[in-house]
């Protein structure tokens, strides 16, 4: 039990300041109820008179003093950053650190990347600070919620803020007054030296004549051997090797492509497309298209739209075999995957519901997905699904090739480069911009008739886009 003389509550109110400022002020404090944890009870009230003297009854009174309690924000708080949650189809990933212990990071700056089977997930810093500890080694496997690193908040931000402040006064300080120019350097001493005033000494004449030999008696001596000439191509080149661990994306790509070869009965059929009409259409309307839709008109949208049209005409190419149930799954929608090459591997983002899109919608979708792929910002949702794939090797100058099916799909279209070639047109030979196209399909599901008909439908739509309007 606390004594009555120390019976002071820990609440401080505005009324106390008013009492201190007044003189001969009579105030009453109502005794407030105290928490149950206190071991003393509250007495009713007390009368206090302030005039250099304080009158109160300690045995029957208590002070009720209220105060505001403030909290202190610790700048050097250490927080633990955890692995973000993955998509449903991804369970784990490999960590690739971009920062080390002791590095200063700003808010939202990328500290590491987690490479999964489908994409890379960037982990930013939640606040400015300094990396205190890395909890996972480089290349280690992590799951959603795994602690990654410890960050000391504010430590780096303070240093970064002091640096500009220290530079500002130095920049604002006026330059010191220029000192007097230094005296010109003395002229360099002449290399010839002073002009001689006397004749140089004459060498003494030998007392005896020197032995002389006829030229024929002197035997020639062999010249010193020249150093061996280096091998052709310069100095010997060091033959070294280096080993780099395959990332998860590359491993997954290799696994899926090999599974496709082992599972599908792949067969490829070819055709060629005259690009004259589509090239002329693009040349005529590219400026108006860019002005209206704020996007450039390319050839990819024509092939994507043509593929959607051909898939509706040949639903078997848009179908897939479910090996678990031994059933054929037909889709009434068209989701086309567009293969995009990135430094970390090949990714295939998906354009959904292409059957409902026009050229402008397709171009915008392709541009958005390509921008995400270049910035490594593709999410797993951007690559889920897909009923058909288009691979454009022509951007790298490819002339001919056989693409591999992207499982679990049943076919893939391969585009190639556009080259001027002589072709027979109306009984005459003309130079036309031509492109070879290839369709690789799963022969377990798609017969040759459907495959050839599908490819010829794409050829007809690209060569004359008016087919789409006439629904032919």
Image (spheres, rainbow, N blue to C red):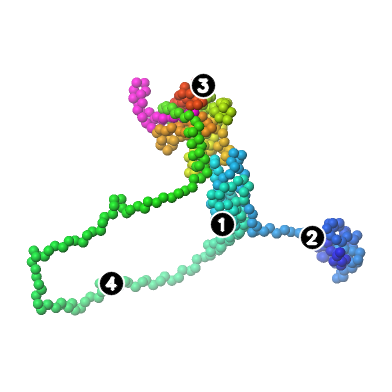
User: In the drawing, does residue 343 fall left or right of residue 54?
Assistant: left
Q: Which residue is mark 1?
A: 101
Q: Position of residue 291 (x, y in %)?
A: 51, 35
Position of residue 226 in the picture relative to residue 36 (left or right): left
Q: Is 37 in front, or is 274?
A: 37
What residue is pinned by disc 2?
67
Residue 418 magenta: yes
Measure how far apart labels 2 and 1 are at the Cα level: 43 Å
In x, y percent, where is residue 290? 50, 35
Based on the picture, tell me whether residue 243 belongs to the magenta stretch.
Answer: no
First-in-chain label (3 vs 4): 4
User: What residue does disc 4 label?
Assistant: 190
Mark 1 surroundings within 10 Å by alpha-carbon count, few (fewer than 14), some (14 through 19), many (20 or more): few
Q: Which residues are magenta?
A: 417-442
Residue 159 lies, in percent from the top left, at 58, 60
Judging depth in this view, the residue of 44 and 218 nearest the camera is 218
Alpha carbon separation for disc pair 3 and 4 = 96 Å
| Quarter of image, res 415 | top left
Task: Give the CA distance from mark 4 to mark 1.
Answer: 61 Å
The reply to whether dot 2 and dot 3 touch (C-beta < 8 Å) is no
> Is the residue under label 4 in contact with that under label 2 (CB below 8 Å)?
no
Quick one: SS at disc 3? loop
* Image height of 418 relative to 120, above or below: above
Residue 443 in the image: state x and y as whole percent: 48, 26
Going from the N terminus, do you reach mark 2 or mark 1 first?
2
């Amino acid at each position: 039990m606390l004594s009555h003389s120390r019976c002071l509550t820990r609440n401080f109110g505005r009324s106390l300041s008013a009492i201190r400022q007044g003189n001969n002020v009579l105030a009453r404090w109502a005794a407030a109820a105290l928490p149950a944890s206190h071991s003393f009870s509250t007495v009713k009230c007390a009368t206090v008179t302030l005039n250099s003297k304080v009158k109160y009854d300690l045995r029957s009174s208590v002070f009720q003093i209220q105060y505001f309690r403030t909290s202190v924000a610790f700048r050097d708080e250490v927080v633990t950053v955890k692995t973000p949650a993955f998509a449903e189809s991804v369970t784990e990933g490999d960590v690739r650190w971009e920062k080390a212990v002791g590095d200063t990071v700003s808010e939202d700056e990328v500290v590491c990347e987690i490479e999964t089977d489908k994409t890379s997930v960037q982990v930013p810093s939640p606040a400015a600070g300094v990396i205190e500890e890395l909890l996972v080694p480089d290349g280690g496997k992590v799951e959603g919620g795994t602690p990654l690193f410890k960050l000391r908040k504010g430590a780096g931000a303070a240093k970064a803020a002091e640096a500009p402040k220290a530079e500002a006064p130095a920049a604002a300080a006026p330059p010191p007054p220029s000192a007097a120019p230094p005296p010109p350097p003395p002229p360099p001493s002449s290399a010839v030296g002073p002009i001689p005033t006397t004749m140089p000494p004459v060498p003494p004449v030998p007392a005896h004549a020197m032995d002389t030999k006829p030229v024929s008696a002197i035997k020639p001596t062999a010249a010193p051997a020249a150093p061996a000439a280096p091998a052709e191509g310069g100095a010997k080149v060091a033959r070294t090797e280096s080993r780099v661990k395959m990332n998860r994306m590359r491993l997954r790509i290799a696994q899926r492509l090999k599974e496709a070869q082992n599972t599908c009965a792949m067969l490829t059929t070819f055709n060629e497309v005259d690009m004259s009409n589509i090239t002329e259409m693009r040349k005529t309307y590219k400026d108006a298209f860019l002005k209206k839709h704020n996007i450039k008109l390319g050839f990819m949208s024509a092939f994507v739209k043509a593929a959607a049209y051909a898939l509706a005409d040949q639903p078997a190419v848009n179908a897939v075999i479910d090996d678990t149930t031994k059933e054929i799954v037909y889709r009434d929608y068209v989701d086309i995957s567009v293969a995009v090459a990135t430094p970390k591997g090949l990714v295939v983002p998906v354009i959904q519901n292409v059957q409902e899109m026009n050229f402008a919608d397709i171009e915008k979708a392709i541009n958005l997905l390509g921008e995400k792929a270049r910035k490594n910002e593709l999410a797993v949702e951007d690559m889920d699904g897909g009923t058909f794939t288009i691979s454009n090797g022509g951007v790298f100058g490819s002339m001919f090739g056989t693409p591999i099916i992207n499982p679990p799909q049943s076919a893939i279209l391969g585009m190639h480069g556009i080259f001027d070639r002589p072709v027979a047109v109306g009984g005459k030979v003309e130079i036309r911009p031509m492109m070879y196209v290839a369709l690789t399909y799963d022969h377990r599901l798609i017969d040759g008739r459907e495959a050839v008909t599908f490819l010829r439908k794409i050829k007809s739509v690209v060569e004359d886009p008016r087919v789409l309007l006439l629904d032919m």
